[in-house]
Amino acid sequence: MTAPSQSPRRGLAVILSSPSGAGKSTLARRLMDWDPTLSFSVSATTRAPRDGEVDGVHYFFRSRAAFDQMVADGEMLEHADVFGNRYGSPRAPVEAALEAGRDVLFDIDWQGGQQVRNSALGRDVVSIFILPPSIAELARRLRDRGQDDAQVIAGRMQKSESEISHWAEYDYVLVNDDLDQTEDRLRTILTAERLRRDRQPWLSQFTRGLSDEFREREQ
């Protein structure tokens, strides 16, 4: 008797959070490249698209009225106001993926993480917080990526202190001082979480089979 090589299980909701500039979006992309079976939770937002961003791929770009209606209709797993814009995770595609046994990756802040953990999907959540190696390095990364002006960067730096203060709410906390090493640790976490006993629904039947084998040997 051998253990099944592939066994059905419910998917994981994997939350990655960090202050802006600590590397969570880059790490999320790397995880997706490592395991193409990972589904990415595409967020909805009221902000305007940046150059190269595609609706439905990078974000669902919605008017504020349309976004507010989705919240009112219970169609969001989580939502928050960030730097004057609204962001949220549509519920339906996430629930469908988890039911089908696919893991879903969330690139969201601590507020969104709290809401997902406190939702009906809480038992499916694995939460990971990414810390920068220093505040000076965090500021350098924000400047070097060239996406925001000085005023926006100052606002992100001011908010980072509050974001970092929520590190202890997460299951795992990693310091992103080396991108390759941090990616390796994320892979290890995801592999271990997939192998948890309560994530292997086939084990009960398998171990009953082992017990049957013992009885057969005794006959």
Image (tube, helix red, strand yellow):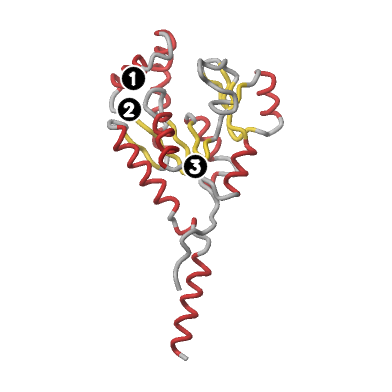
Q: SS class of the residue under badge 1? A: helix
Cα separation, mark 2 vs mark 3, equals 25 Å
Residue depicted at x 32% and y 37%: 182
Q: Which residue does the numbered mark 1 point to in the structure image? A: 141
State which quarter of the image contains the N terminus.
bottom left
Residue 156 vertical position relative to residue 28 in the rendered view, above or below: above
- The residue under the point 54% across, 57% down is 8
> Do labels 1 and 2 touch, CB within 8 Å?
yes
Circle 3 sits on which residue? 38
How far apart are the two marked residues, 1 and 2, measured between alpha carbons? Answer: 10 Å
Q: Earlier in the sequence, mark 1 or mark 3?
A: 3
Give the crowd class for mark 3: few <14, some 14-19, many >=20 residues within 10 Å.
Answer: some
User: Label 1 to label 3, Cα distance in Å?
Assistant: 27 Å
Which residue shows up at 62% across the image and 33% down it?
90
Given the image, on which type of amino acid does mark 3 rest?
Leu
Residue shown at 35% from the left, 30% from the top: 131
> Which residue matches tag 2?
132
